[in-house]
Image (tube, rainbow, N blue to C red):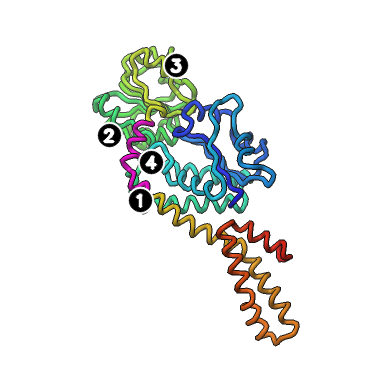
Amino acid sequence: MNRFALIGVSHRRGGAAALESWQAELNSSAIKSRGFDHFVHIATCNRWDTFTVLPEDLSLDEARDLLSLTNHKVKPYAYHGDAALEQLTRIASSLDSLNPGEDQIMKQVREAYQHARQAGTVDKAVSFAFETALKIAKKVRREIDLAPMNTSLFSLARTDIERLIPKSGKVAVLGAGSMGTLAAKSLVFLGYETLIVNRSEERARHLAKHLNQPHRNLAQFFEDWPELDLIVCATPIKHLLDKARLEHLRGLKLIVDLGIPRNVDAEAAEALGIKVLDVDRLQLAGQTRREELGQKLAEAEKLIFSELELALDDWSEKQIGPGITRLRDWYLTTIGDSLDSTIANHLAHKFAHVPIKGLRAIARAYGPEAAQLFLKESGLDD
């Protein structure tokens, strides 16, 4: 546990500009090339995180430097040891999300873990961390009522949408990925007819059919500009709506930009009188909601800590279990040379009780690595 590290940036800590930079420059291949063998890389529209087991010759500060960008003033946050596992569990439980209780993050953490397993960057310790974090996140989701189902980052824009856009308003969602799908579902639920737009017409058609809504591919959208009151952008394309394209959308009242990198030239849009809600601007609504959820978030934190304590105790016991067996066998062999086997077995268990109790206490307090060091120095390691 004491070699765990979690290093990253997020919208809450760093902002959209930092997040865009890290996601553009540090993917899984780049992380591996900087000397990290065992890690999981989590990249979403809200965060960039790397959970890793530090190599023995690398400190936390050195690891953070390796995962920093020399041309960026923002320094990534860094957690070490049990604190790294605690933060991973908060992330998976959506407690660190811009909109606490949102549904997507648990799935995104699970997918990142599965991708890393396929890539061969997950060892036994990293596997334990993610299996534990995801198990606890499910328990938090089940037992603490943080948000309704299908809550997402987009949900933070609902107040502005309902205030500015009448139910008869014309609405489009650009992007049919996970974030675009959630946004489209929310808009349809609110009663808006929603045009689904995607670069792949097949993907747009699939979502539109599911929601019983119209669709276009992106090229058609840019060739035959519809009259719209609201656009939700959820694509990976920087400045998809630039100044030239925004000129075709002068009747537009509001754009919700959920993309990373940001899909909209916000300065050009606002010069045309179009209000833009990007993720940085949704932070205020997220902070307000976080304050409203104060008691429930505290309950979730308490649940996380209690479940992690149980998981860490269980992990420590499993790690030192073989060593405990070898310690008992050593006593049995030593005593058995001169005593009846039944008596020797009884005495071996009795004499081993005190050092085994001490080993378990060391493992709980300082991690199984400390207990393994004791066993190694005693000649009882593998």
Q: Return the residue at label 2.
A: 190
Q: Number of labelled discs? A: 4
Q: Residue furthest bottom?
A: 340
Q: Are marks 3 and 4 in contact (CB under 8 Å)?
A: no
| Residue displayed at 58% across by 49% down | 126
Q: Which residue is mark 1?
A: 144
Secondary structure found at label 2: loop
What residue appears at the point 72 percent right and 77 percent down from the top-left corner?
333
Q: Are marks 2 and 4 in contact (CB under 8 Å)?
A: no
Residue drawn at the location 49% of the way across and 23% of the way down: 238
Q: Are marks 1 and 4 in contact (CB under 8 Å)?
A: no
Q: Secondary structure at mark 3?
A: loop
| Eye-nearest disc, 3 or 4 | 4
Residue 269 drawn above or below residue 322: above
Q: Which one is closest to the eye, mark 2 or mark 4?
A: 4
The residue under label 4 is 100
Q: CA distance from mark 3 to mark 1?
A: 42 Å
Quarter holding residue 207: top left
In the image, the segment drawn in magenta is 283-299
Instruction: Give the answer, above or below, for where 310 lies relative to 117.
Output: below
Q: Secondary structure at mark 4?
A: loop
Pick whichever, 87 or 141, lies toward us. 87
Q: Position of residue 202 (x, y in %)?
A: 45, 31
